[in-house]
Amino acid sequence: MSETFFHLTFVITFLVFTAIRAYYHRLAMATRGKVEYREGKLHTGLRLVVGIPFMVVFFAYMIWPGIAGWAVIPLPLWARWIGVIFSILSVPLILWIQRYLGSNFSTTLHVRDAHTLVTQGPYRWVRHPMYSLLFVQLVGMLLVTANGLIGGVPLLAFIVIVVARIKNEETTMIEKFGDEYREYMRRTGRFLPRGILPRLKGMGI
């Protein structure tokens, strides 16, 4: 399979995925009202200092893949195809998640006056389906690009951010919604539907 095919798959799916998130972010910004940010200054600063230069390289790679040729990973063809599948599936799934998240969507941790607890759609089973999907999308990006810089760095950064943020995020939701959120936590999984992992272990996976 031509390397051009994998590169175009990455570029098209990433741009569509990003455009969908940008569209819903704009809608949320227009209706969010008063906001109280809970994002740490260190985290925000790192996103600017590290994120902006990386995005310059990232978008340059879309036009000229050879700029990151030194970071190519020799992956087997089947792994590249898994990357294609993950990348394509991420597009309808992000639409599904964003539809139910609605005006509560934000790329930063915050609460707002009209903040609502979403428990429908994918949120019926999982508290943080956006994080789960972003993990799948980023794994897909790593596999389809077969590039440690373009695919590996965002995946590693994402894992670090989620690990650092998740406890604060759930504490914030408890402060906002109280027992309603505690009950929601009891019947849902954090990243996968409750009960999935025990079943997988029982299957020897």
Image: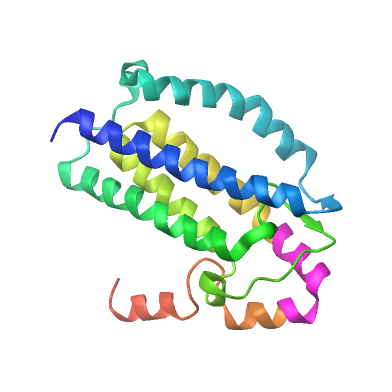
* Residue 107 visible in rendering: no
User: Which residue appears at 66% of the width and 25% of the height?
Assistant: 49
Quadrant of res 179: bottom right
Was residue 177 drawn as part of the magenta stretch in this picture?
yes
Please state the horizontal and vertical placement of residue 60, each as a whole percent of the image.
43, 19
Please state the horizontal and vertical placement of residue 129, each as a whole percent of the image.
53, 63
Q: In which quarter of the image is the N terminus?
A: top left
Q: In this view, does 40 lie above or below 92?
A: above
114 and 47: which is toward the camera: 114
On the rendered structure, is 77 left or right of 193? left
Q: Is residue 176 above or below residue 156?
A: below
| Chain part drawn in magenta | 168-181
On the rendered structure, is 158 left or right of 30? left
Q: Is residue 42 above or below residue 168?
A: above
Q: In which quarter of the image is the C terminus?
A: bottom left
138 and 166: which is toward the camera: 138
Quadrant of res 22: top right
Q: How many marks?
A: 0
Please state the horizontal and vertical placement of residue 192, each as a whole percent of the image.
48, 70
Name the dominant secondary structure of the magenta segment. Answer: helix
User: Which residue appears at 72% of the width and 37% of the height?
Assistant: 44
Was residue 186 drawn as part of the magenta stretch in this picture?
no
Please state the horizontal and vertical placement of residue 70, each as a whole percent of the image.
32, 19
Q: Is residue 47 above or below residue 88?
A: above
User: Which residue appears at 41% of the width and 52% of the height?
Assistant: 91
* Residue 167 visible in rendering: yes
User: Which residue appears at 57% of the width and 78% of the height?
Assistant: 188
